[in-house]
Amino acid sequence: MNEHFLEPLIKQYLSEKDITQGTYNLFKIILDQYISYLKTHQIDFPTTIDVIAFLEWKKSDGCSIRWTNHQIGTLKNFYRYLCLNLQRLSLPEVYAFDIMQTIQREILDHNEFKPTLSTEQAKQLLLYCKERRHTRSQYRDYAIVYLMLTTGVRSIEIRRAKRKDLKRVKRQLVLYIQGKGKTASDTYVKIPEGLEQAINDYLSLRKDNNPFLFIGHSRHQTTPYLSRSFVIKMFKQLMKDAGLEETQVTAHGLRHTAATMNLQRGGSLESTRQLLRHATVTTTMIYAHHVGQMKDEPENEIERLILDFHEIKTET
């Protein structure tokens, strides 16, 4: 496929940005997706309408409002750069007009409660993932869903997790994770017994030296870790195949589901804050309508709430 006119400009734009490696990677992912969309639709000189269509397409693919706002912000910065450097870069006059000027970020309602799975739906999803296991990818998907449902980890934490992050503290297996905005794996979640078996079953099928805990098994995999879009598409397909598509629960919705179920089983707001690793309880207040008295071991309690351990564990 021929190079799009914007591709060398994106390379130059990123090379001139004084940003961290993490921000650089974020910008590149968004701009690469944008270029791919333009190429697919044979758009040489995009307009505001084309950008809106791109954003709507990403939403239909499962992108959250937060991620959409990242896309809008990145494209705003890029097109502003083109306008300001029109003469220096010898650009066509069409780039003198900022096509992002009228596109605004969407307002996030932090008090809006996101869709979650009921206990029965969570059990339905987990059992479906267990029963369909035949390939390494399916064993991986089962372990990922199990991990997200019982510990409330984010998809980015799933993608960053490495094998070495699995450690045993006394007799309890834990997974050290690199949280959102963190540069090191400095906190951990407890791994329930059934989840430990699911992870071990997956790892036993791996013959590679890849350090990441969960990886892609397609021959077309180009990175040692899973991409954000991969997790979104994988989970969307799982929900459809499991008959739960109408719930509109996203991969991140499993985090909300874990929080809700912790409160339903009697955990307190503080227990839920610790489960989700929120900095303050204020962030956790959205779940306040489920508050009950404090109980210990939320990860194990959530596993027991979804299903009886003996029903889900893999037979040895």
Image (tube, grey):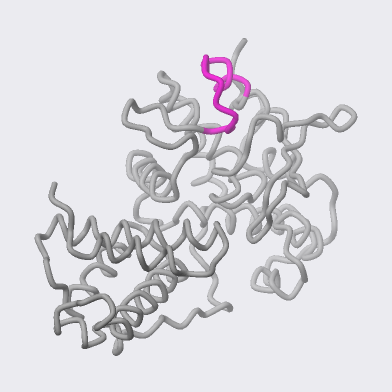
For the C terminus, the quadrant is top right
Q: Residue furthest right?
A: 170
Number of marks in the rendered image: 0
Task: Give the percent coordinates (x, y) of residue 20.
Answer: 57, 62
> Is 26 in front, or is 256?
26
Task: Give the percent coordinates (x, y) of residue 165.
Answer: 71, 35
Q: Is residue 173 left or right of residue 181?
A: right
> Is 155 in front, or is 101?
101
Task: Give the percent coordinates (x, y) of residue 2.
Answer: 13, 50
Q: Is residue 37 left or right of residue 81?
A: left
Q: Residue at x 76, y 40 (%)?
A: 190
Q: Residue at x 34, y 43 (%)?
A: 237
Q: Residue at x 40, y 27 (%)?
A: 217
Task: Give the percent coordinates (x, y) of residue 144.
Answer: 54, 37
Q: Is the residue 62 above or below the residue 77 in the image?
A: above
Image-quadrant location for residue 230 = top left
- 201 part of magenta stretch: yes
Image-quadrant location for residue 148 = top right
Q: Is the residue 76 above or below the residue 215 in the image?
A: below
Residue range corresponding to the magenta coloring: 200-214
Q: Is the residue 94 above or below the residue 278 in the image?
A: below
Q: Residue at x 57, y 77 (%)?
A: 110
Q: Kindly report the secondary structure that dominates the magenta region of the rendered protein.
A: loop
- 112 part of magenta stretch: no
> Is 139 in front, or is 69?
69
